[in-house]
Image (tube, coloured by chain):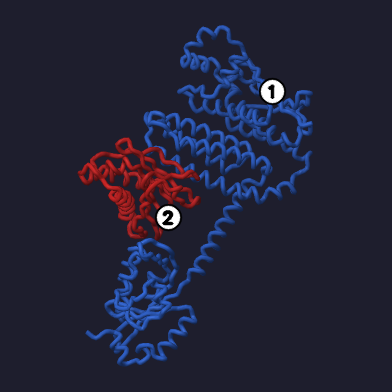
Chain colours: A blue, B red
């Protein structure tokens, strides 16, 4: 059978063994960064073949080898299959060049190169183009041209990735710009701690019988992250946390959750980890701007009261509760700068907690001979002990009796002690995390976790907390924070 | 990696044991690989390229591979080389199953087997790698997946 090379070498001296013409062609194409090779109708590689093409194809001597065979283990099976169809189509003289050019599966492909042991050592991004060689109206062969565009590809990839990153960072920036950088760092450190707890819990879950407890622990950590995010109005984290909690709540419904049930959990953990890393990077970069553009102190003070009033009004109306905020004895200017964020968080948390779990609906209040409009009162005072921060509301404290019953079921040995319990003992009971009632599990769990979050935050600020309440008339929380000398 | 991907890798690993020995392996809770090393006596590593890039590796104790090889070869004594081959074969089979399921848009390399307690098998930190621990006949092993989305 007459090969293409035979045919071409008879008619075209340019394709003879290194003639001046082929050297010239190679020189020109090399200079242009391209390699070339010839394919016959059986798609077998023929001479002439440039050194650059040999490098790109990753073969020392590809002449006489089927082109598709050379592609094996270098590109995916899908590309090989499409190349087979495409190269066969090239031999149909009726098809036009433009259409064929558009369907070239090797227009840009990643080539992976194996070493002698069959391992991929490197890869290149190659751009192939194929020109048909006609003779008497028939396609007799294909001139393949190949160019290594790895560098361009890498630059393009980096550009795309940077664009995407910048877009995402802008979104984050808008999301976090309203929060002080120190507070953000504190939030991120807290979230990191909780995330590490979650990861550790997943790593050491124990036996399948312990999986429900693993879920509880993860729930608690996510709840804390969400709570902190909500305090700072970090809407993305709040929303993410909310969805995550819902997911865990769904899994908790199962009587015996298995390892498969944790798959969506670990995927969310991965998302949270990536997001935290991203935000940490941004915070590092913008923290200097934050410091420079910090608002004036008097304005910040006004803003503090304003934002708490906003929370009380909006959440009150959302929950269908009527509440007035009294702040006559609250002096934001007396709060040192270093406690400002913590104070804001405490007041937010306590006010939110009062609205959700303490203050009754107007009808209920009327039945209890209370004014329909509830009162939340905030006050601040500097004393020799430190800064006293107070929030008092005239609602109830969440279902104390029910919590006590629950406690007694869990710990029957406490029954004898119950008679001697005073308000302080009951207070300790209420603020013991994990006092959950199956019927109103989410509500009470939310309450319990809110309080746990508050306690942790007060402790980390070096402060202490005192709670006075009656089950139906009021709840008074005083937080004392140390003052720096 | 998506939830579906993880489900698929887990199912693929579990069915390998079930199909070859008739005894199912028990998956544990997946977690993210941190900086701590995760290497047991033998590890079979497969490179993945194409639409997804990265690697998967299975790392198993000598006890697990020994019992598995006894089951498959029906012989009481198993050589170290046979255990190494088996580690590579498991990784290869799992990756092969995945390729079959996901189509020909990605390639898998020949398996590389690492014997002994290497310091660690380093996978990129980003995106974080998933670890799927599992037990078979009370012997422990892990499948580690480090693939770009």
Q: Please tell me whether residue A464 is drawn above or below residue A53 in the rendered image.
A: above
- The label on residue A478 is 1
In-image side of B113 versus A408 (left or right) = left
Image quadrant where one finds the N terminus of chain A: bottom left
> In the picture shown, does residue A74 fall above or below A11?
above
The disc numbered 2 marks a residue on which chain? Answer: B
Q: Nearer the viewer, mark 1 or mark 2?
A: 2
**Residue A121, label in figure:** none
From the image, which quarter does the C terminus of chain A lie in? top right
Which residue is under mark 2? B54
Residue A312 in view in this figure: no
Residue A124: x and y, percent?
44, 67
Circle 1 Cα neighbour tier, 10 Å, few/some/many (<14 / 14–19 / ≥20): some
* Residue A193 locus on image (x, y percent): 56, 37
Mark 1 falls within which chain? A
Identify the residue at image location x=35%, y=62%. A118
Check disc 2 and report its element: helix, strand or loop. Answer: strand
Residue B78 percent across, percent down from the top left:
26, 45
Residue A128 point in image, percent of width and height: 41, 74
């Amino acid at each position: 059978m007459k090969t293409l090379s035979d045919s071409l070498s008879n008619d075209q001296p340019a394709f003879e063994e290194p003639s001046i013409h082929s050297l010239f062609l190679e020189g020109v194409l090399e200079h242009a960064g391209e390699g070339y090779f010839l394919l016959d109708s059986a798609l077998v590689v023929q001479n002439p073949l440039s050194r650059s093409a040999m490098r790109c194809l990753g073969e020392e001597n590809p002449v006489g080898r089927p082109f598709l065979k050379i592609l094996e283990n270098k590109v995916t099976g899908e590309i090989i299959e499409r190349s087979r169809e495409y190269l066969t189509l090239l031999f149909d003289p009726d098809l036009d060049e433009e259409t064929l050019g558009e369907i070239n599966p090797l227009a840009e492909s990643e080539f992976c190169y194996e070493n002698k042991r069959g391992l991929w050592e490197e890869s290149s991004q190659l751009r192939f183009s194929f020109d048909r060689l006609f003779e008497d109206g028939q396609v007799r062969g294909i001139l393949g041209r190949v160019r290594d565009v790895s560098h361009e590809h890498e630059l393009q990839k980096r550009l795309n990735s940077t664009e995407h990153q910048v877009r995402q960072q802008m979104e984050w920036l808008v999301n976090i710009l309203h929060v002080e950088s120190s507070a953000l760092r504190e939030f991120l450190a807290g979230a990191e701690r909780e995330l590490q707890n979650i990861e550790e819990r997943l790593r050491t879950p124990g036996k399948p019988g312990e999986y429900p407890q693993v879920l509880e622990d993860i729930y608690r950590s996510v709840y804390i992250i969400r709570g902190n995010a909500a305090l700072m109005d970090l809407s993305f984290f709040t929303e993410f946390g909310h969805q995550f909690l819902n997911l865990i709540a769904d899994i908790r419904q199962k009587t015996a959750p298995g390892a498969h049930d944790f798959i969506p959990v670990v995927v969310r953990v991965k998302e949270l980890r990536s997001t935290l890393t991203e935000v940490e990077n941004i915070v590092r970069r913008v923290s200097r701007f934050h410091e420079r553009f910090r608002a004036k102190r008097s304005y910040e003070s006004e803003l503090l009261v304003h934002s708490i009033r906003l929370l009380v009004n909006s959440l009150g109306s959302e929950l269908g509760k009527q509440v007035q905020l009294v702040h006559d004895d609250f002096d934001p200017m007396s709060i040192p700068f270093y406690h400002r964020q913590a104070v804001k968080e405490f007041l937010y948390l306590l006010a939110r907690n009062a609205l959700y779990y303490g203050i009754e609906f107007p009808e209920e209040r009327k039945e209890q001979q209370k004014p329909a409009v509830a009162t939340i009162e905030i006050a601040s005072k500097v004393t020799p002990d430190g800064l006293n921060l107070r929030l008092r509301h005239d609602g109830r404290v969440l279902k104390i009796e029910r919590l006590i019953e629950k406690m007694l079921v869990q710990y029957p040995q406490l029954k004898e002690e119950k008679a001697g319990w005073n308000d302080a003992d009951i207070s300790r009971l209420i603020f013991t995390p994990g006092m959950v009632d199956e019927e109103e599990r989410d509500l009470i769990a939310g309450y319990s976790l809110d309080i746990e979050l508050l306690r942790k935050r007060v402790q980390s600020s070096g402060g202490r907390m005192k709670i006075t309440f009656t089950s139906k008339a009021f709840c008074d929380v005083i937080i004392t924070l140390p003052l720096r000398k | 990696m998506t939830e579906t991907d993880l489900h698929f890798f887990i199912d693929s690993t579990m069915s390998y044991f079930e199909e070859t020995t008739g005894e199912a392996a028990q998956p544990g809770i997946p977690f993210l690989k941190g900086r701590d090393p995760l290497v047991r006596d033998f590890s079979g590593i497969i490179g993945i390229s194409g639409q997804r890039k990265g690697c998967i590796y299975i790392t198993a104790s000598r006890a697990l591979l020994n019992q598995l090889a006894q089951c498959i070869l029906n012989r009481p004594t198993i050589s170290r080389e046979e255990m190494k081959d088996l580690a590579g074969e498991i990784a290869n089979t799992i990756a092969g199953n995945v390729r079959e399921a996901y189509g020909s848009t990605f390639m898998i390399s020949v398996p590389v087997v690492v014997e002994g307690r290497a310091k660690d098998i380093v996978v990129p930190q980003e995106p974080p790698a998933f670890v799927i621990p599992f037990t078979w006949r009370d012997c422990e092993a892990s499948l580690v997946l480090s693939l770009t989305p």
